[in-house]
Image (cartoon, rainbow, N blue to C red):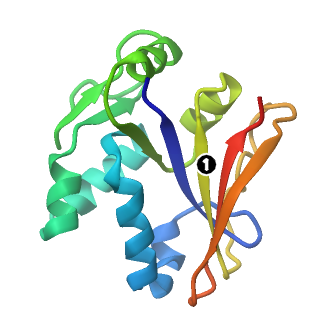
Amino acid sequence: MRKIIESTFVTLNGSISDPQNWSGPFWDEEHFGYSGKLMENTEALLLGRATYEGFADAWSQRDGEMADTFNAMPKYVASRTLTDTTWNAKLLEGDTVEAVRKLKEEDGGDLLKFGTGSFSQTLLEHKLVDEYHFWVFPVLADGVQLFAESEIGINYLELLGTTTFKSGIVVHKLAPKA
């Protein structure tokens, strides 16, 4: 059975909006090293529509070892509006929750989920995420707050570990409590 791992960038005040506008100054060797470790057991990406569109536009223009791996990796996209995909992606068909459950039941490597929006809330509500990596950046920014629009009730998480970078990023690795 595969694991779903969600990797999310968030500011100190909980904003998840437009990380491309505030995260860049903190990207360094430690950042790329941690990202590389997340990719080691990853077989495919699991993305919502907005993240898929942004990533496809940005990553398809890049090259190099990490970009080549990222671009070649299969992607599964949750969307109510897309009808076609590019960038080695496939739409999740039918009921999204059931489609994700089937993906988890398959043999293979981890499914890495980037971005946080309604798709992440759906995965949380249905307890489909096995591990969260919340990258807390030392910056304050306007925008949508993490899980602000959701009705997720109370979900307790267990701290699996914390990684602190010299840049000030702190990654909290958490798993849902049973």
Figure quadrant of residue 104 = top left
Which residue in the protein does label 1 denote?
132
> Looking at the image, is 146 positioned above or below residue 29?
above
Tell me residue 136's x, y (percent): 65, 70
Which quadrant would the C terminus be assigned to in this image?
Answer: top right
Q: Residues within 10 Å of mark 1 (few under 14, many from 20)?
A: many
Tell me residue 1's x, y (percent): 44, 23
Type of residue at label 1?
Tyr
- Whether residue 46 can be seen here: no
Tell me residue 38's x, y (percent): 42, 56
Figure quadrant of residue 107 = top left
Identify which residue is drawn at 15% across, 47% down: 72
Using residue 65 as the reference point, say whether residue 55 is left or right of it: right
Element type at mark 1: strand
Seen from this angle, which residue lies furthest right?
154
- Whether residue 68 can be seen here: yes
Using residue 16 as the reference point, say whether residue 159 is left or right of it: right
Identify which residue is drawn at 81% across, 36% down: 155
How many marks are shown on the rendered structure? 1
> Looking at the image, is 169 positioned above or below residue 117?
below
Identify which residue is drawn at 80% across, 31% down: 151
Tell me residue 6's x, y (percent): 53, 46
